[in-house]
Image (cartoon, rainbow, N blue to C red):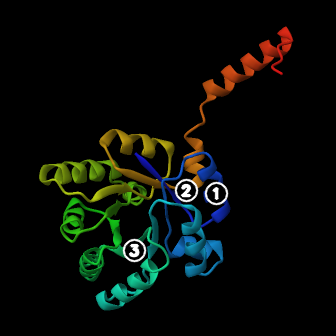
Amino acid sequence: MKFFADTADVDAIRELDALGLVDGVTTNPSLIKKSGRDILEVTKEICSFIEGPVSAEVIATEAEAMIAEGRKLAAIASNIAVKVPLTLDGLRACKVLSGEGHMVNVTLCFSANQALLAAKAGATFISPFIGRLDDISLDGMDLISEIRQIYDNYGFETQILAASIRSVNHVRDAALIGADVMTAPPAVIKALAAHPLTDKGLAAFLADAEAAGIKIV
């Protein structure tokens, strides 16, 4: 499973990248707003040190305007994935931009039927939103499973990018189902390393080492 950092915080991305935990980055208007920076400026900086896909989202809602914005975003760097919403206009933009050789991430997916349409439009990534489905008492993992089965049934190459991930359990379950990618906030990615038994065992080892006077020099 590939790990994408869901943030526009350059320092947080660099920290995860140093750990080898960043295969790509996803951003959206809300994350850009939180960064307090210009979308083109911060996206260009991220692309300067991240080799994998960096998703940058269009703001327009009409197809032709989405295509124009998508082309402008794609011109930032060769690893830009243009992010478009899962609407009919977004699918049209996806078809055109993917036909031009650009990576396209179709976002705000909440049903298997929507995911099927995105694959047929040539999407590089489909982003089903797990957490937002959980928020309305549906199981977001059921959607991941349905998309996986449909894509495998027909050999679609669109990658399932599990999004709106809120917990380490979301990451585990998406990996078990077979999502190709997960995108999560840096805090969730770092939390994957945490376990109380690891902390307890390390504390015991260190105490024994100190008691035995063990030193490695």
- The answer to which of marks 1 and 3 sits earlier in the sequence is 1
Q: Position of residue 214 (x, y in %)?
A: 82, 13
To which residue does mark 2 refer? 185
| Dot 1 amino acid type | Arg
Residue 89, quarter of picture: bottom left
Q: Residue at x 44, y 58 (%)?
A: 164
- Residue assigned mark 1: 14
Q: Amino acid at mark 3?
A: Val
Question: Tag 2, which secondary structure?
Answer: loop
In the image shown, does 79 or 153 lie closer to the viewer? Answer: 79
Seen in the picture, residue 209 relative to 121 is either above or below; the reply is above
Characterize the local packing of mark 3: few (<14), some (14-19) or many (20 or more) Cα atoms within 10 angstroms.
many
Nearest-to-viewer mark from 2 and 3? 3
Three-letter amino acid code of the residue under disc 2: Pro
Dot placed on the residue nearer the N-terminal end, 2 or 3: 3
Q: CA distance from mark 2 to mark 3?
A: 20 Å
- In the picture, measured across the screen, residue 74 lies left or right of residue 120, that is right
The residue labelled by disc 3 is: 82
Q: Position of residue 41 (x, y in %)?
A: 60, 79
Image coordinates of residue 55 in percent, x first then y, are 45, 68
Q: Which circle, 2 or 1, is nearer the viewer?
A: 1
